[in-house]
Image: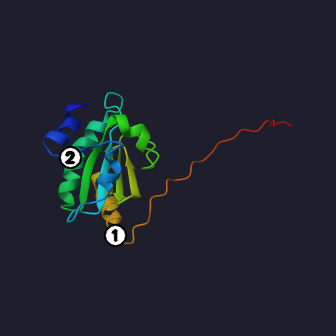
Amino acid sequence: MSALIAALASRHGLPTIDAETFNTFLAPAAGEPEHALLFFTGDPDQRTDSGDVAVVLPELLAAFPSQFRAGVVARSAEAALKARCQVEIFPSLVVLRRETVLDVLPRIRDWSEYLDRLGATLSPNALPFSAPERVGITTSNRRADA
């Protein structure tokens, strides 16, 4: 684990979420915000922008005081939880309202995009996240001169 990711727990008090604590984390205690922000880091040795997202995450929490509960998904739980959270790219921040995924923000983003997208998820009318459809490319056996 990188020092920047480790600092999220030691300096900022963010819990590490694993497969056993995931459901409990998503259910806010009395007085806690219903929105959660989960950080899927991926391997920081292979994903250099994981450190960048680790630096931005506390700033995002400061920009939205008392609006999100945040946690770091344990590397050992990422494979088990990524489909449930619709994560396809590491690192990613995932916004949930209780168990509903509202947005997935892969890699590092522009500050204004973070503010816009996180702000939109706080709306009571925010719709569940729907991953963009993938475009499939096929080839044809037809020859151009046929």
Which marked residue is nearer to the observer: mark 2 or mark 1?
A: 2
Q: How crowded is the residue under tag 1: few (<14 C-alpha within 10 Å), some, or many (20+)?
A: few
Tell me which residue sits at (45%, 49%) in the image: 86
Q: Amino acid at mark 2?
A: Leu
The x and y percentages for residue 141 are 79, 35
Residue at x 69%, y 41% (from the top left corner): 138
Q: Which residue appears farthest toward the left when viewing the image?
A: 11
Quadrant housing residue 108 = top left
What colour scheme has been applied to the protein in the rendered image?
rainbow
Dot 2: within a 10 Å radius of its alpha carbon, few (fewer than 14), some, or many (20 or more) residues?
some
Q: Which mark is residue 134?
A: none
Give the side of residue 134 with respect to residue 75, left or right: right
At horizontal 19% and vertical 32% (from top left) the residue drawn is: 3
Residue extending farthest top: 45
Quadrant where the N terminus is found in the figure: top left
Q: Residue furthest bottom?
A: 125
* Percent position of residue 109, x then y: 33, 48
The answer to which of marks 2 and 1 sits earlier in the sequence is 2
When asked about the image quadrant of residue 72, the answer is: top left
How many discs mark residues in the rendered view? 2
Query: Is disc 2 placed on a helix, strand or loop?
Result: loop
CA distance separating discs 2 and 1 = 24 Å
Percent of width and height locating residue 57: 24, 48
Badge 1 is on which residue? 123
Give whichever of 110, 31 is nearer the camera. 31
Asked if residue 130 lies left or right of residue 125, the reply is: right
Q: Position of residue 24 (x, y in %)?
A: 31, 53
Badge 1 element: loop
Q: Which mark is residue 14?
A: 2
